[in-house]
Amino acid sequence: MDLEAKKTVLRHFPYGLFAVTVAQGGEEHGMTAIWVSQAAFEPPMVVVAVENTSKTIGMIRDAHHYGVNVLQQGQRDLAGKL
C-alpha cells in the first residue's frame, strides 16, 4: 500500500464495531472491540483497547501483530460469536 493510501485509511478510520483477530502458534482467536484509534502515520499503526486478563492480549504479545476488521451494519451476529 502506498503512503497516500495509508494516510487516507488512517484519517478516515471509522467509529463502530470491530473484530480484532490474531493467529499465533497454530491457534486463531478473535474478539469484538468498540475502541480503536490511530496511533501513528509512519509507520501506520492503530491501537485497540484489550483487557489485560483476556486470551487475546497474550496472543497479540506473542505474535507481535493483529488484524482489525471493521464490521458492517448487520454483522452483530458475527460480533456476538467473538
Image (cartoon, rainbow, N blue to C red):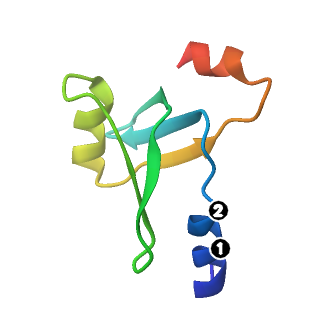
Task: Decide if residue 67 is on the left or right side of residue 63.
Answer: right
Which residue is at the front of the view, 51 or 12?
12
- Give the secondary structure at mark 2: loop
**Residue drawn at point x = 42 percent, y = 40 percent:** 22
**Residue drawn at point x = 45 percent, y = 53 percent:** 37
Q: Quadrant of the N terminus?
A: bottom right
Q: Residue 52's x, y, as percent? A: 19, 29
Quadrant of residue 72 in the image? top right
Q: Which residue is mark 2?
A: 12
- Give the secondary structure at mark 1: helix
Q: Are marks 2 and 1 in contact (CB under 8 Å)?
A: yes
Which residue is at the front of the view, 10 or 65?
10
Which residue is at the front of the view, 76 or 58?
76
Q: How many marks?
A: 2
Q: Residue furthest right?
A: 74
| Crowdedness near tag 1: few (<14), some (14–19) or many (≥20) residues, C-alpha within 10 Å | few
Q: Residue 23's x, y, as percent? A: 41, 41
Q: Residue 50's x, y, as percent? A: 31, 34
For badge 1, the amino acid type reads Thr
Q: Which mark is residue 44?
A: none
For badge 2, the amino acid type reads His
| Crowdedness near tag 2: few (<14), some (14–19) or many (≥20) residues, C-alpha within 10 Å | few
Which residue is at the front of the view, 79 or 11?
11
Q: CA distance from mark 2 to mark 1?
A: 6 Å
Q: Which residue is mark 1?
A: 8
